[in-house]
Amino acid sequence: PEYAVPQAPEDPLFGLMAAFRADGDEKKVDLGIGAYRDNDAKPWVLPVVKKADILLRDDPSLNHEYLPIAGLTDFTSAAAKLILGAESPALSEKRVHSMQTISGTGAVHIGALFLRKFYAGAPTVYFSNPTWANHNQIFSNVHLPTSTYPYFSKSTKGLDFAGMKNAISSAPDHSIILLHACAHNPTGVDPTRDQWKELAMLLKQKRHFPFFDCAYQGFASGDLAKDAWAVRYFVEQGFELCIAQSFAKNFGLYGERAGCFHFVTSPSSSATSTTSRIASQLAILQRSEISNPPAYGARIASLILNDTKLFAEWEENLRTMSGRIINMRKALRSKLEELGTPGTWNHITDQIGMFSFTGLSEKQVAELRESSHVYMTKNGRISMAGLNTHNVEYFAKAVDRVVRE
Ligand code: LMR
């Protein structure tokens, strides 16, 4: 048979990771993929995760049987409480269906597939410009039309709120609007609470469907409730919405693929039966794609989420990660200001979460890689976690050189 399969380009982010690994220079700096590193640029197994791992290993009742199609119930119900708040009326009114997924990517995908199948008229999905590169790919793969709304202002290196609102209000009614719950990837720029309120009002007027991607709860500010504020506000406003929730970053469970998809129906007398119908269809989609989700990461997260002491320890670990990143933001900004590097650098400390959108051009990014063995994505995004007290000065000097050229 003849196959008309054209060669596809390598994934830019994973390609960058491979290029970094192949670079033999000892000064090399990895600011590519969004994965937490400690002050020695090493992956960090959260101490609370280590503890949970030992507890699991010692549990004689555990086996390797299949999980249910919708995943580990103790995990999915704790995950729902974590994002929605334990007191959420959506939970007490049984308006939420939660299903375990292959981390955040799997949750975005199952949501996209579900909406493609059941949301009348295959509406356009609007992403922020820019957004996480995989969003476009995931929604396009299920044949939903995609478009963008302005998000990042090049001049202020902050939010282009007017542009964002304008595009959302010009979109056809009942569009799907993808929103980053907190710590926007790649820009590190989030709307303020007042801006979220305005957005909620606008989405309601237009009857748009909010799709929240939440990959950084607790990781952005170190405060789990604060990072969930926007999602909880939209739920309070009575929206029907869905949430893709990842535990890759906040538990450091990257390769274990622990995640959850939540569908929240709006308050109405028939909400419970709607939720049950949605659950039944999601189960079919899940069964045909992955049958049932992987157990290990969900067991680890579940153990921690359902135990008061372990939970408190997790919050401490979250503060360690977010605190170190905030310190690196301060350090990088002050080094650049000390060097008198042309331009303004306040955006580095204004932006939050794993990433900073530096404003460096594609050419400058290429030069940094060539001359200083610094690896970052072409759009000028840096993973703040790749910086540490040993390399921040080296990086600042390298930036200073390319900006002056
Ligand atoms: C990133 O954007 O670096 C992370 O979310 C990793 C990924 O899967 O793309």
Image (cartoon, grey):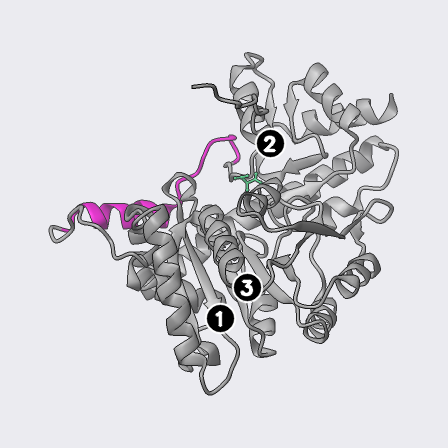
Classify mark 1: helix, strand or loop.
Answer: strand
Ligand 1 closer than 8 Å to label 2 CB: yes
Q: Which residue carries the number 2 mark?
A: 32
Which class describes the residues within 10 Å of circle 3: few (<14), some (14-19), or many (20+)? some
Q: Residue at x 19, y 45 (%)?
A: 57
Query: Can you say which quadrant of the picture contains the C terminus?
Result: top right
Residue 264 badge: 1
**Circle 3: residue type:** Tyr
Q: Which residues are magenta?
A: 39-59
Asked whether disc 3 touches disc 1, contact meaning CB atoms under 8 Å apart, the reply is no
**Circle 1: residue type:** Val
Tell me if residue 202 is in the magenta stretch: no
Q: How far across and down, in percent of the image, does residue 266 sit?
A: 53, 78
Compared with 311, 350 (above or below) is above
Ligand 1 closer than 8 Å to label 3 CB: no
Marks 2 and 1, Cα distance to the nearest angstrom?
A: 34 Å
Asked whether the viewer can see residue 177, the reply is: yes
Count of labels shown? 3
Residue 92, image quadrant: bottom left
Q: How far across and down, in percent of the image, does residue 329 sit?
A: 68, 43
Which class describes the residues within 10 Å of circle 1: few (<14), some (14-19), or many (20+)? many
Instruction: Compare residues 171 and 135 and report the one nearer the observer.
Output: 171
Q: Which residue carries the number 3 mark?
A: 119
Classify mark 3: helix, strand or loop.
Answer: loop
